[in-house]
Image (cartoon, rainbow, N blue to C red):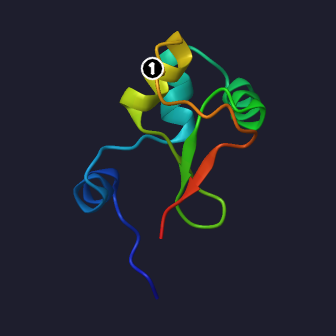
């Protein structure tokens, strides 16, 4: 059985501290549904860790939410698969 990683362990393994949907919503004062809608519209991007788990890069999310994103593709459902 695969060992579950804590946020700190995942940050070490992936080289960046990624936050959950709930953490991102709380940090930016948005609801989970709003973040999911933004993701579906291509306004923000996320990293998929496993079949149902999304993680956000805080710096990337900040840039996308404030409109300072220089390298945004604007594609619908902008989710990167992590292996």
Give the camera-side residue of 35 and 68: 68
How many labels sit on residues? 1
Q: For the point 46% across and 88% down, which residue is it?
A: 1
Image height check: is 75 above or below 29? below
Query: Where is mark 1, residue-wise?
Result: 63
Q: Is residue 66 left or right of residue 10?
A: right
Image height check: is 28 above or below 76? above
Q: For the point 53% across and 12% down, which residue is it?
A: 67
**Where does the image place residue 18, in percent across and percent down from the top left?**
39, 44
**Dot 1, crowdedness within 10 Å: few (<14), some or many (≥20)?**
some
**Where does the image place residue 32, in percent across and percent down from the top left?**
67, 30
Asked which secondary structure carries label 1, the reply is: helix
**Where does the image place residue 3, in percent across and percent down from the top left?**
38, 77
Q: Is residue 60 left or right of residue 38?
A: left
Give the camera-side residue of 6 and 67: 67
> Which image quarter: residue 73?
top right
Q: For the point 66% across and 26% down, which residue is it?
A: 43
**Where does the image place residue 55, in percent across and percent down from the top left?**
50, 46
Q: Is residue 9 left or right of residue 81?
A: left
Q: For the point 45% across and 20% down, which residue is it?
A: 63
């Amino acid at each position: 059985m695969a060992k579950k990683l804590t946020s700190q362990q995942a940050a070490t393994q992936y080289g960046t501290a990624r936050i959950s949907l709930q953490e991102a919503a709380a940090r930016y004062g948005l609801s989970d549904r709003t973040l999911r809608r933004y993701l579906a519209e291509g306004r923000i991007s996320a990293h998929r860790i496993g079949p149902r788990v999304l993680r956000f890069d805080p710096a990337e999310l900040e840039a996308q939410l404030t409109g300072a994103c220089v390298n945004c593709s604007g594609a619908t459902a902008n989710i990167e698969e992590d292996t």
